[in-house]
Image: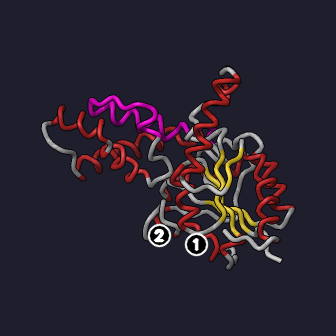
Amino acid sequence: MKKIELAVFDWAGTTVDYGCFAPVKVFLEIFKEKGIEVTLSEARAPMGLLKIDHIKAMLSGERVSKLWEEKYKRAWNMEDVNEMYKSFEEKLFKILAEYTTPVPHCLETIKTLRNSGIKIGSTTGYTQEMMDIVVPKAAEKGYAPDFYITPSSIPAGRPYPYMIFRNMAELKVGDLDCVIKIGDTISDIKEGRNAKVWTVGIIKGSSELGLSEDEIKNISEEELKKRMMEVEVKMLSAGAHMVVEDISKIPMAVEIINNKLAAGERA
């Protein structure tokens, strides 16, 4: 009987860096350097993409593109993108180590999955050089997946499915129905669906929700519920098979999917 054999997690906003604040902070700064004030929602919208693609996506937004043309009297080009990306890398490398703490319930959830015989894979929008900082620091704090891959070593990053396929190859899982992809962004959802595996979105700690732990504690219950519902609808609309409150609910999601597999359903 089929069952989940591999769980492929995202990193920032899913397993580490609650709220996915490291890259957001830097995206805001590099646009400010160019004299353009972008909003938090504009900075977060493309989250999950390879970071240079993220910058291009932000520049392509109607409002930001218009602001750029008003300021520079021309459209942005790849020279601008490369310059901004260089600044992004320099700034991110300085702070990245500070944003590697596993999110609440991450370590217990990974232990529960492993005790069930599930392998732990991972994908990311960070480059290999960025992960050279994140991986050892997260490991020091207790989180170390069985395998990770970056867009640096494949034809294309999210929303393409290649990183998931590399996880399957390296961890020797051959059946798409036996894989679950877990993430906190729309790019994660699209990556999972494009790979044709079970795809689950996480709300609390996510870039889509965009709230720190303190903000979640201090916000009214009514407002939090409203914002969480908005994220859930967005993720389901993007194709998520399921959306859960936080990472602690992933073992429950696996159980539900295993029941679906037993009933003959497929991803």
Q: Amino acid at mark 2?
A: Ile
Q: Position of residue 94 (x, y in %)?
A: 48, 39
**Residue under label 2:** 154
**Residue under label 1:** 166
183 or 103, nearer to the observer: 183
Residue at far left of view: 73
Q: Position of residue 159 (x, y in %)?
A: 48, 60
Q: Position of residue 9 (x, y in %)?
A: 65, 56
Residue at far right of view: 115
Q: Amino acid at mark 1?
A: Arg
The image quadrant where one finds the C terminus is bottom right
Q: Secondary structure at mark 1?
A: helix
Question: Residue 43 sits in which quadrant?
Answer: top left
Q: Which mark is residue 214?
A: none
34 or 19, nearer to the observer: 19
Label 2, label 1: how far apart the Cα atoms are: 9 Å
Question: Residue 59 sits in which quadrant?
Answer: top left
**Residue 153 on the magenta span:** no
Tag 2 near tag 1, CB within 8 Å: yes
The residue range painted magenta reads: 17-44
Most common SS among magenta residues: helix
6 left or right of 154 in image: right
Q: Residue at x 56, y 35 (%)?
A: 210
Tell me if residue 263 can be seen.
yes
